[in-house]
Image: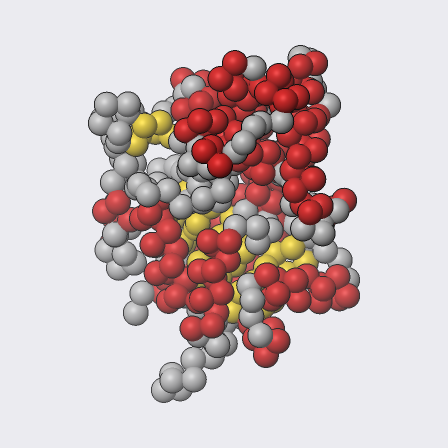
Amino acid sequence: MNRSKDVVLLLGAGASADAGIPVSAQMITELESSFIDERQKALYHHVKSAIYFASGLKGKFSENVPYNIEVLVNSLYELERNEDHPLFPFIAAWNSRFVDLAGPDFRNVRIFRQSILGRLKRWVAPDDPHTADYYQGLISLQRDLNYPLQIFSLNYDLCVERLNSPDFSIETGFAGYGPQNCWEWNRFELEEGDGNSAPNVFLYKIHGSIDWKRDETTKKLYRVEQIANVDADKLELIFGREFKMEAADPYLFFAYRFRELTLGAKLIVALGYGFGDSHINKMISQSLRNDPNQRLVVVQRCSGAELAARKKDEVRTTLELNADRADQIIIEQGSVKEFFERNNLAAQLTQHIPADPDAPF
């Protein structure tokens, strides 16, 4: 029996928050406090106001407006397409002030979006990598479970990859760095029981990674050691795009793998995930509906039974699960850092797995 598929870990932005990597809302705050170009600041205010106006038409105001760095970049990306956008023929005229701020061919929109992507490289690469040392809890977890971990990450940072060592191997799909070591899907096919060849962790970077680069000629993906060598506008990231599913590998493969492994898992552990990705939510929801014995553990910064209960109901509602499915959701209070630093983490996790009703004993 392949126990390595019993537990699936899902890392969201909150997992790296204690490493000094800002979450989306913090990125917005930093962006708004650091404008130097007044014209770019005016463009930002115009786009932000339009996003809030659109939400207001739907009855959403103030903190209920779904506004963050990805919504902003997605809006800029769509605006930048201008005449190439399929809706362009239906637009009678752009707002005159926006046209003035956007510049010829909306060049200022493109420059602004690229500047945000440039900041992203700095945001997800903290000066001191040791701030993410709490991720070493994954090493203890894997050794206690004694089978490879299946980790899906929505993050672009390298907090998990930095755990890689001769004594702890992490499979990312690459044999090494550089264009001679392109991504290969079959590197994820090694299973528990394959002896010393099996890695300790299978890492699936669902939305891309800050150290990925695509060859402009072959279109093949490879890793680089120096992220400074990757142009901001060519970052291989699904960042700020409304459609989170790219019609290319490795994204399609990772999406398929997530669906496959969640459907077969006994326990899904969401760490620092805010349930803001509809594609991921649908697959988790499908998995929980498919198996009433499956459990979803949500590590969430909240304190007290009342807040935990409120979060549980919020997750259930987001996943569109009936009230009778609430017992499948377990809220673990505290930060991901605190969670990773727990003693006997493996035992605490596996205790949430219900006994198999079909087991002979």
Residue drawn at point x = 77 percent, y = 66 percent:
306
Q: How many marks?
A: 0
What colour-coding does the image apply? secondary structure
Q: Is residue 85 left or right of residue 56?
A: left
| Residue under the point 75% across and 66% down | 305
Left or right of 180, for residue 138:
right
Please state the horizontal and vertical placement of residue 277, each as a whole percent of the image: 52, 50
Residue 84 in view (yes/no): yes
Asked if residue 19 is positioned above or below residue 231 in the image, the reply reads: below
Q: Position of residue 147 (x, y in %)?
A: 37, 58
Rendered image quadrant of residue 312: bottom right
Q: Residue furthest bottom?
A: 360
Inspect this view and state whether residue 347 appears.
no
What residue sits 26% from the left and 29% below the top? 219
Residue 257: x and y in percent read 34, 54
Q: Position of residue 38 (x, y in %)?
A: 70, 14
In the picture, which quadrant includes the C terminus?
bottom left
Q: Is residue 97 above or below residue 347?
A: above
Q: Give above or below for 271 relative to 295.
A: above
Task: State the residue in front, 10 or 252.
Answer: 252
Q: Residue at x 56, y 70 (%)?
A: 321
Classify residue 303 by image quadrant.
bottom right
Left or right side of 245 for 25: right
Give the quadrant of the N terminus. Answer: bottom left
